[in-house]
Image (cartoon, rainbow, N blue to C red):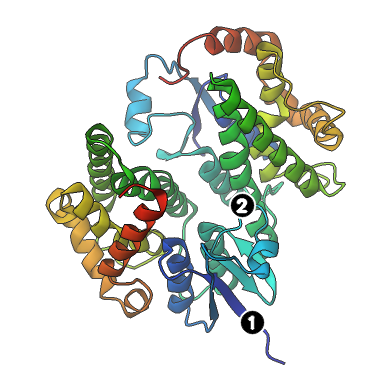
């Protein structure tokens, strides 16, 4: 009997990535919502190094870091693969997932918290370059994974959904349809995907949450 | 017909390049290392095969480029499976990947290099504290084992050991000793450096120290 648990936070795109992968593979799991302002003993015990969500627990074994967890899920439940099987294509998918995590999401995070206008201007320019690069990588496909979503699409979930909410709350226009039509088309497909839909936090609740936090001095707990 | 033309666009001091070279040596694979002049002028091949980062290493397998050292080492392990670098079970692999992610996030740039880049006492103290904390976390991960995954030298060791040749610079500028702060990690460093595949690739830390002195001049720190 498989026992799968997921420690997550409803707002976090990182924990939603893991939920998405589990749902794509039809894996049943127990979800345990975490209060990151008052971290549980369970979380601190299961992820002592980073003290963050998501944490996946499978038959008592704990794992942290969402992209690491995605690889584990793909290896353990090979149906509906999220990574290509060919080593070169798999390596390219890992490269793009890392690019999205470090350059794209990393840059967007800095923008969200940057108070200096000149600095923000530079960061926005860098982010635009990232979006152009991503548009190139889509290569006319529906998803980064081709006809079906894969690890790269899952890694890009913040851009796919959360970014829209950040833009509404902050008034910033980072991804617009006239500037990035290809990326916007991917975002449309992503949020309309039948399984992705199930894992997205409700838009109005996410909006309220971001509104509260973006006004605060710091996001970090 | 001979296939498997393996090329690495390289820099002798880059721990990321060292990772790839150690992995190739562990697999007994022949390759050509082409040195790049990272400050004087990057080659056209580097700029076209890594347009996003324009960094080394770039690994070319029969002309097909791959970038990012952890991606490259995983590819090498999957393409030439023996001897295995990653552990055999999905769970053990998840642990290995977790530690490589930690090392990449925390060890080189955030803590070790932050020491020799620090200007001012506060920055230095902060960097030293961070570095010592990271060493202790790594020591905890190693535990009583010979290598990170157990008895056999593998993926985490390969990705971690190259960074350690940069520690001497941090020790000198930070006035601390890795051996005093983390004796078990220190023993692991010595154990790995005794391996031929590592010793041939990882340079003398004194040479890296000289390199760091020049980097500091370039950054306008010294």
Q: Residue at x 43, y 49 (%)?
A: B104
Residue designated by label 1: B5
Return the chain for callout 1.
B
Same chain for labels 1 and 2? Say yes or no: no
Question: Looking at the image, is A78 positioned above or below residue B124?
Answer: below
Q: Is residue B125 above or below residue A10?
A: below
Q: Where residue A210 sits: x, y (%)?
A: 59, 13
In the rendered structure, find residue A30 and report the number of the disc placed on it.
none
Image coordinates of residue B165 in percent, x first then y, are 30, 63
- Say few, some or many: other residues with alpha carbon within 10 Å of mark 1 (under 14 / 14 to 19 / 20 or more): few
Relative image position of residue B108 (x, y in whole percent): 37, 50
Label 1: element kind: loop
Give whichever of B37, B84 is nearer the camera.
Answer: B37
Kindly identify which chain the residue marked by label 2 belongs to: A
**Residue A158 falls left or right of residue B22:** right
Determine contact: label 1, label 2, CB under 8 Å.
no
Measured as percent of width and height from the top left, residue A63 is found at 44, 40
Of all residues shown, which one is farthest toward the left? B180
Q: Note whether residue A87 is visible.
A: no
Q: Quadrant of residue A185?
A: top right
Q: How many marks?
A: 2
Check residue A94 in the rendering and tell me which mark sits there, or answer none: 2
Examine the rendering and report whether any part of residue B172 can be seen: yes
């Amino acid at each position: 009997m498989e026992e799968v648990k997921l420690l997550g936070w409803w707002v976090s795109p990182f924990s939603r990535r893991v939920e998405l992968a589990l749902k794509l593979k039809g894996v049943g799991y127990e979800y345990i919502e975490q209060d990151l302002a008052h971290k549980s003993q369970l979380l601190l015990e299961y992820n002592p190094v980073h003290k963050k969500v998501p944490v996946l627990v499978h038959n008592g074994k704990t794992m942290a870091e969402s992209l690491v967890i995605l690889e584990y899920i793909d290896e353990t439940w090979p149906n509906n693969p999220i990574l290509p099987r060919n080593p070169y294509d798999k390596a390219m998918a890992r490269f793009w997932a890392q690019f999205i995590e470090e350059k794209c999401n990393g840059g967007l995070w800095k923008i969200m918290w940057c108070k200096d206008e000149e600095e923000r201007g530079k960061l926005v320019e860098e982010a635009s370059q990232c979006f152009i690069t991503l548009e190139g990588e889509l290569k006319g496909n529906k998803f980064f994974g081709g006809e079906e979503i894969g690890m790269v699409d899952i890694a890009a979930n913040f851009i796919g959904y959360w970014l829209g909410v950040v833009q509404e709350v902050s008034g910033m226009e980072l991804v617009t349809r006239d500037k990035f039509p290809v990326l916007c088309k991917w975002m449309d497909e992503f949020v309309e995907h039948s399984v992705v839909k199930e894992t997205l936090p409700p838009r109005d609740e996410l909006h309220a949450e971001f509104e509260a936090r973006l006004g605060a001095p710091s996001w970090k707990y | 017909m001979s296939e498997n033309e393996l090329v690495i666009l390289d820099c002798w001091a880059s721990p990321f390049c060292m990772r790839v070279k150690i992995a190739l040596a562990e697999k007994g694979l022949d390759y050509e290392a082409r040195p790049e002049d990272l400050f004087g002028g990057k080659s056209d091949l580097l700029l076209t095969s890594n347009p996003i980062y324009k960094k080394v290493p770039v690994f070319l397998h029969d002309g097909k480029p791959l970038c990012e050292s952890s991606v490259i080492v995983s590819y090498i392990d999957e393409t030439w499976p023996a001897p295995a670098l990653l552990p055999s079970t999905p769970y053990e692999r998840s642990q290995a990947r977790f530690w490589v992610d930690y090392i990449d996030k925390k060890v080189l740039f955030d803590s070790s290099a932050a020491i020799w880049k620090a200007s001012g006492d506060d920055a230095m103290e902060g960097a030293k504290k961070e570095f010592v904390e990271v060493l202790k976390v790594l020591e905890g991960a190693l535990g009583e084992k010979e290598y990170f995954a157990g008895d056999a030298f593998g993926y985490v060791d390969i990705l971690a050991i190259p960074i350690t040749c940069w520690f001497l610079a941090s020790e000198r500028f930070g006035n601390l000793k890795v051996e005093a702060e983390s004796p078990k990690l220190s023993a692991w460093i010595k154990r790995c450096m005794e391996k031929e595949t590592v010793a041939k690739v990882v340079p003398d830390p004194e040479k890296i120290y000289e390199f760091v002195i020049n980097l500091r001049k370039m950054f306008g720190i010294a």
